């Protein structure tokens, strides 16, 4: 009987040892799967952010291309408003169209680039001429020939300016 008791204890120890080994293996497997899950979720979040940014960039690029094509119309409206006109109702109509166009640009976050009185910045302005005026600062913009515009932080058309030396 003692021999049976010893075998029984030996078998129980072996079963307990196998249970602990299996449990440890399962815990390692669970930790590995949990780690893989977290990595995949992080990759998916990064993918979503990258896709959203690419979508926004594409939208702004297309919008910028469309607006660039429409800016000469705005230039002509500005010229028409500043021209003398005897027909006051006609002039008011042109001013209304100009206002609607400016509202459209503002709605789409398109801003005019400030020029006169500002310091020349080659990332915003294109110098087409230089003058010497002792009353003005060096590199100060003294005249604007064509308005420039920005879409957000991106310049879609540089301002054409005259700069003081």
Image (tube, rainbow, N blue to C red):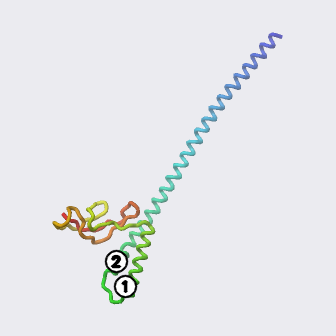
Which part of the image, by quadrant, shows the C terminus? bottom left
Q: Is residue 46 left or right of residue 95?
A: right
Residue 101, x across and y down, in percent? 42, 75
Residue 152, x across and y down, in percent? 41, 62
N-terminal-most mark, 1 or 2: 2
Looking at this view, is 61 or 152 the one in front? Answer: 152
Name the outermost residue toward the right. 1
Location of residue 28 (image quadrant): top right
Location of residue 159 (image quadrant): bottom left
Q: Residue at x 37, y 85 (%)?
A: 91
Alpha carbon distance from label 1 to label 2? 11 Å
Dot 2 crowding, Cα within 10 Å, few <14, some 14–19, many 20+: some
Name the outermost residue toward the front. 135
Dot 1 crowding, Cα within 10 Å, few <14, some 14–19, many 20+: some
Q: Is residue 108 left or right of residue 133?
A: right
Q: Is residue 12 above or below residue 89?
A: above
Residue 113, x across and y down, in percent? 33, 66
Q: Is residue 102 above or below residue 45?
A: below
Residue 72, x across and y down, in percent? 36, 74
Q: Residue at x 36, y 88 (%)?
A: 88
Q: Residue at x 42, y 70 (%)?
A: 105
Name the outermost residue toward the bottom. 86
Label 2: element kind = helix
Q: Is residue 16 above or below residue 126?
A: above
Q: Is residue 34 left or right of residue 121?
A: right
Label 1: element kind = helix
Residue at the spot of label 2: 78
Looking at this view, is 111 or 128 the one in front? Answer: 111
Q: Is residue 9 left or right of residue 66?
A: right
Which part of the image, by quadrant, shows the N terminus? top right
| Res. 91 mark | 1
């Amino acid at each position: 009987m003692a021999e049976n008791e010893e075998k029984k204890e030996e078998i129980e120890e072996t079963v307990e040892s196998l249970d602990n080994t299996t449990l440890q293996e399962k815990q390692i497997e669970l930790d590995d799967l949990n780690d893989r899950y977290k990595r995949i979720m992080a990759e998916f979040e990064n993918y979503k952010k990258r896709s959203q940014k690419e979508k926004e960039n594409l939208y702004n690029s297309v919008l910028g291309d469309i607006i660039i094509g429409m800016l000469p119309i705005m230039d002509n409206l500005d010229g028409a408003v500043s021209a003398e006109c005897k027909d006051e109702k006609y002039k008011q109509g042109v001013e209304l169209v100009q206002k609607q166009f400016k509202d459209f640009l503002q709605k789409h976050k398109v801003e005019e680039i400030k020029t006169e009185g500002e310091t020349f910045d080659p990332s915003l302005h294109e110098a087409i001429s230089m003058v010497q005026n002792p009353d003005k600062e060096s590199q100060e913009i003294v005249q604007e020939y064509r308005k420039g515009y920005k879409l957000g932080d991106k310049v879609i058309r540089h301002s054409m300016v005259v700069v003081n030396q």
